[in-house]
Image (cartoon, rainbow, N blue to C red):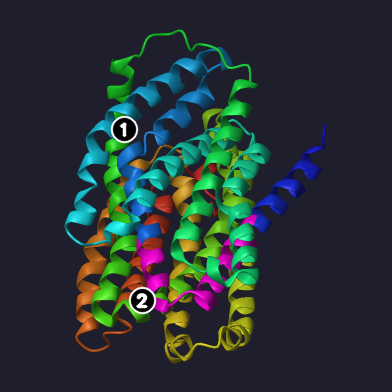
Amino acid sequence: MPTKKITRLINIALRGVTLGSKFLLIFFLARFLEPAELGIYGLLSATISYALYLLGFDFYTFTTREILKCDRNEWGGLLKDQGALSLVLYAIFLPLLILVFLKGLLPWHVAGWFFALLVLEHLTQELGRLLIAISEQLMASAVLFLRSGIWAVAVTALMFVTPAARSLDVVMAAWTVGGILALLLGIYRLNHLGISGWHKEVDWNWIWKGLKIAIPLLLATLAIRAVFTLDRYWFGSLAGLDVLGAYILYIGICNALMSFLDAGVFAFIYPALISAHNKQDSAAFRQGIRKMLIQTLVLTVAFALIAIAVIDPLLNWLDKPLYLEHKNLFQWLLLATLLYAIGMVPHFALYAQGQDRPIIHSHIASLICFIPATWLASTHWPYLAVPLGMCATFALILFWKSWAYFALTPAKYRLFQS
């Protein structure tokens, strides 16, 4: 068996390759597809990401805590209960999502890809979250690599050598194949974990108990994720589908930071924070927060410096004047992402303690802040309105969660006890 250090290195390598693949994909899509096609790809991806919450209701936030409190012979029953809830949500929301196409938010020719990818993304996302929660980070990274990494490499290579493959349908097909492979690997690993308790009947009372906890968190998540979905539609309405392609390119670069932080920092530290709090180990809790803060700051600063250094050469390589013309979008989107990334440290510190209320309130406030801030900015700087609105929103969240962490965390668990 590999040692803990080797396992973490392999995990980071897998996540790094996945991140690199997604980064590579967005640049090759910008190179080989028309900006309007890249805009559609961005809208499709954002809408799938948002619809995932309707299929899962963020119930994993409850299940994760419960699993960490239980023995392995009880896990099967909990997972069966979550699966039963998901089937109910599928029956309700999949038909309703047809409205996305009836209202013209997305073109009908991507409807088949949308529903196939939505289901695959939900199932593989939940498997990945489960594997992370039970400290199977390496397998979770392998699932993520198939889900988001290897297919991006394959389709990039195919588009590079075969001009006829430079189409959105080929990208969607590769994404679907990657999702299927990730699902099969996740199921295979789940079958070999020795989990029991599957024979237990579905406990609807336990599900209802979980929903009462998860739904407020869901509303908060839907609010914050609405910012990451509304931004694309709003920007497209202000600037047009072609310029939206430039926005998708720059936000894709910035989101690489969050992908790396999720993989290399948060996924490793937040389960340990929950366990330390459950065991009332204040020293381990403080140490975990300190590690998360330092690693987050180092990575965000390093990412920003590298991104600023390489953006011009990358844009010159794309050889499309539209992207260079709107490069000023990048600096504001980068600032917004840095604020959001740092705000995740007090977020996880609060979440590990079960302090959900300030998380919920700050996320709902984020949408309330984003809409008027963007609208006000649009009257003066229509092309920068959305990025400026995001900067204001994530600055508010960072301040709110930081204040809540210091106000609500007992002194012995607080990082700066003075």
Local SS, label 1: helix
412 vs 101: above or below: above
Left or right: 54, with 113 as reference point: left
Q: Amino acid at mark 2?
A: Leu
Say which residue appears at 57% left-offset and 66% top-offset.
Answer: 25
The verdict on residue 26 being magenta is yes
Which one is earlier in the sequence, the residue at label 1 or at label 2? 1
The verdict on residue 127 being magenta is no
Residue at the front extreme of this rendering: 164
Q: Nearer the viewer, residue 257 or 290?
A: 257
Residue identifier under label 1 = 213
Residue 130 is situated, as x and y percent measured from the top left of the image, at: 53, 33
**1 vs 2, front mark:** 2
Left or right: 339, with 58 as reference point: right
Q: Amino acid at mark 1?
A: Ile
Say which residue appears at 36% left-offset and 80% top-offset.
Answer: 242
Residue 194 is situated, as x and y percent measured from the top left of the image, at: 63, 16
Q: Which mark is residue 244?
A: 2
Local SS, label 2: helix
